[in-house]
Image (spheres, coloured by chain):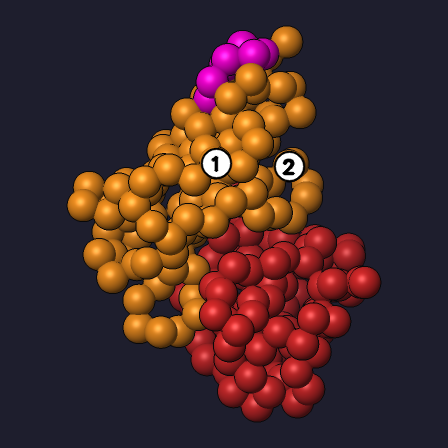
Chain colours: A red, B orange
Amino acid sequence: DAGITQSPRYKITETGRQVTLMCHQTWSHSYMFWYRQDLGHGLRLIYYSAAADITDKGEVPDGYVVSRSKTENFPLTLESATRSQTSVYFCASSARDRGTDTQYFGPGTRLTVL
Amino acid sequence: QKEVEQNSGPLSVPEGAIASLNCTYSDRGSQSFFWYRQYSGKSPELIMSIYSNGDKEDGRFTAQLNKASQYVSLLIRDSQPSDSATYLCAGQGSGNTGKLIFGQGTTLQVKP
């Protein structure tokens, strides 16, 4: 049971490049979330999705794009990476449609933008 | 702005002691609360959830919820060095969105 996975685990890119972070879950959870975590800011929600083809902005969506064509996948794209987007990115999912808001986190992607 | 607040610490306790981690929240509409543990360089993992006023025990962990005071706490009995981590408190956001609002976390250090 793989649960929730993220790829790549580490990524170094340059300013201005497009980067896509992948998130895949095997639980068929309806809800999925993308967070970034930086020292001094805790976890900040970027985007979330209630179901396939339903997405909504979180606290810090600028510079990011998401899509969700399949329930199990929720990719996050940085359209033109900036140094301020250097961070650790966590994907999470929850089975809210089954009555719980408990979120389960993937292992994270550490992104460095040079 | 709905918030969840925690003292960032570090909270230092000797091995075998009780560690008490506290959290306050501003949204009276929040019904569910969660404690996550995050080791350095790792992702948050769920320790406990609590939905009703009172105490909920799971092994060495006890979560306490007081909705009138808008206060959530986590007690760790017989603290071990392996409990050293950052503990994140999260509350359900209101508005039926499925979002959680996270505090910034309290760093716990358990000294042998």
- Where is residue A42? Give x, y as percent: 48, 47
Q: Where B65 sits versus A112, above or below?
A: above
Q: Viewed as shown, does residue B86 lie left or right of B43?
A: left
- Whether A112 is among the magenta residues is no
Q: Secondary structure at mark 2?
A: loop
Same chain shared by disc 2 and disc 1: yes
Q: Viewed as shown, does residue B24 lie left or right of A111?
A: left
Name the kind of residue labelled 2 in the image: Tyr
Q: Residue at x 51, y 21 (%)?
A: B77
Q: Residue at x 66, y 89 (%)?
A: A69
> How would you rate the neighbour count of disc 2 (Cα within 10 Å): few for under 14, some for 14-19, many for 20 or more?
some
- Where is residue B39? Give x, y as percent: 64, 37
Q: Secondary structure at mark 1?
A: strand
Question: Mark on residue B39?
Answer: 2
- Whether B18 is among the magenta residues is yes
Mark 2 and mark 1 lie on one chain; the one further toward the N terminus is 2
Q: Quadrant of the C terminus of chain B?
A: top right
Q: Which residue is denoted by mark 1 in the rendering?
A: B57
Q: Residue at x 56, y 12 (%)?
A: B16
Q: Quadrant of the N terminus of chain B?
A: bottom left
Question: Mark on residue A59?
Answer: none
Image: magenta residue range: B13-19
Name the kind of residue labelled 1 in the image: Glu
Chain of the residue displaying label 2:
B
Q: Residue at x 63, y 57 (%)?
A: A105
Name the front one of labels 2 and 1. 1
- Report which quarter residue A19 is drawn in: bottom right
Measured in 3D between alpha carbons, the distance from the residue under mark 2 to the one under mark 1, in whole angstroms, is 22 Å
- Where is residue A57? Give x, y as percent: 44, 76
